[in-house]
Amino acid sequence: MLEQIRLCGFGGQGVVLAGTLLGHAATSAGFRVAGANAYGAQARGGAAIAEVVIANAEIVFPHVITADLLVCYSQTGYDRFAAEVGGTHPRIFYDSLLVKPAPAGETVAQFGIPATDEALRQLGGKQAANIILLAAAVARTALIGRLHLATAIAEHGGARFRETNLKALDIGFRLGAAAAPEPGPA
Amino acid sequence: MSGHEPAIMPPGNYYLTGNEALAEGAIAAGCRFYAGYPITPSSEIMERMAARLDEIDGGVFMQMEDEIASICAVIGAVWAGARGMTATSGPGFSLMQEAIGYAAITETPLVIADIQRAGPGTGQATKVGGGDLMQAKWGSHGDYTPIAMCPWSVQEMYDLTIRAFNLAETWRVPVFVMGEEAVGHLKEGLTVDAPPAVINHREEKGATPFGHELPDGVPPMPAFGEGEKLLITGSTHDHRGFRKTDDPAVQAQLTGRINDKIMNHRDEIVDTEAHAVDDADIVVVACGFTARSVLYAIETLRTEGLKVGLLRLKTIWPFPDDIIRTVCGSGRKILVPEMNRGQMAGEVMKYAGGDVIPLNRTDGRIIHPHLIMETIRGIA
């Protein structure tokens, strides 16, 4: 098993944090994990990319070569990376408020998740949308157990946001479990 | 310096950056003194050492005014009995070079992490490079022989830093951990086992600190405050440490010994790893992050029937001349990919019998497995 995951969005959305939490969760679940981030010098607004490779054997090359799973927090990120998603189970999860997707292809399963909408509605702010979208992707793909992600949030997320992030985890898991892939072109 | 926290990370699996792992390796190896000046992409080492040394009994952390002061503070701390290190990147490594020569001639065991970025000059502060390999060997003036490690993973940033301290103490020599930005900022699993074996420099009451006639050429080393009379100078000195700047015999003996003590024992120091080289028509010689791209590439190309192998240098200095002679013999093609303009390739050419083909990248990006595969298919 080798999962290559790319998370992309803008600086300030918590893309790098989402990747880091996923890495911690997969590590505590007993997987081999490698992660790399790319982001601009500016604190907010530039492109932010987090890569996480999860495997049950030694990871030879630690960067994503072909993403199986794209978690997309911005239109720019979607436009740049959606076409590159491949592998045996290609899947895209995107924030349905922020991304207008291309029609789903025949091979790529595509899921729109109202992460920012639900964060605004249920948590009173959009900060935890990163966790909602990540949790939805993790739940729908059964990548790792929910407990491991909860532990990662509790131990490695900011203490100030812990409660909100754990609520976001619940919201994301519910949305992910209920998510159905968009129909591909006829 | 509260001393309430355990000094070494408890055994377990962690997910952290290479720079953080390097700092933890230093702590595990007994490093209790850090002086530094922050610079991208090495700053996480300094951050981690600041936090960790504050928790540890006897730990001392100093932020200095620049890199020259940083390495000089480390040299002083080591002579006061501490185990010390500093970390930097290319521009800071350049500033440290004079004092590296001082550490070499005074036989001061210390560790410097150089997390390489794209140079020269200030270059690309946040981008990867591998252009400090020759600087590690030849950066200071005069003849000296340092030891340099090339970790390729977060695990090795930990493990090879522990080894760096042990080598520094064993041979009384500066040791460099030549990580690249791509390894320093890589996040990966780190497995911490039981506390590692820690080697201390030899101590011998009343022995002269610069020229003991032991077969390995490494004199015992006292520290200030232990009751020995100590005189330490960067000028040519005799076995007691007395300046002898007019004496050709003393100069010849000193420079001979501080180089020979490493070169005569390079079998114990050099560390390489061979992957699928036995039947290989093409051998790729690589170190650091690039070697991971190579390993991925050769595993893929083997499935296509191409006979390719990897010789990975875990230590680059002293250079593994004998191993290159053996593995890179005539009739083989030798590909040397590196994130510089051919620093290691030149060294490989000195000892390889086969045709050496450099593959260089200096645009601040890693050498991707696809580029290595494409190159190998082109020369196969």
Image (spheres, rainbow, N blue to C red):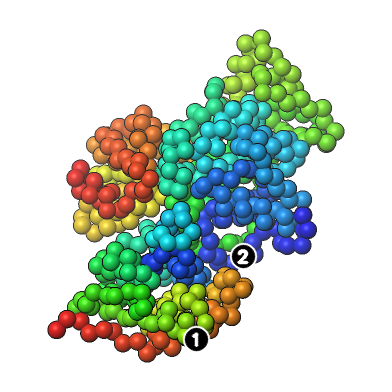
Determine the chain carrying the residue at label 1: A
**SS for tag 1?**
helix
Q: Three-letter amino acid code at disc 1?
A: Gln
Quarter of the figure that contains the N terminus of chain A: bottom left
Q: Position of residue A28 (x, y in %)?
A: 52, 73
- Which residue lies at the image location 56% right of the left edge and 32% below the top edge? B95
Q: Which residue is mark 2?
A: B11
Q: Which mark is residue B293?
A: none
Q: Position of residue B267 (x, y in %)?
A: 50, 37
In the picture, which quadrant includes the C terminus of chain A?
bottom left
The correct choice, above or below, for B251 with respect to B28 in the image is: above
Relative to B232, does residue B90 appear above or below in the rendering? below
Give the spatial CA distance, label 2 vs label 1: 40 Å
Q: Residue at x 64, y 61 (%)?
A: B9
Given residues B34 and B234, the one toward you in this image is B34
| Residue in the image at 52% along x and 47% along y | B40
Specify the quadrant of the image occupied by residue B329: top left
| Residue A105 percent location from the top left of the image | 20, 76
Disc 1: which residue: A122
**Residue ranking furthest to the left:** A186
Residues B267 and B59: in front is B59
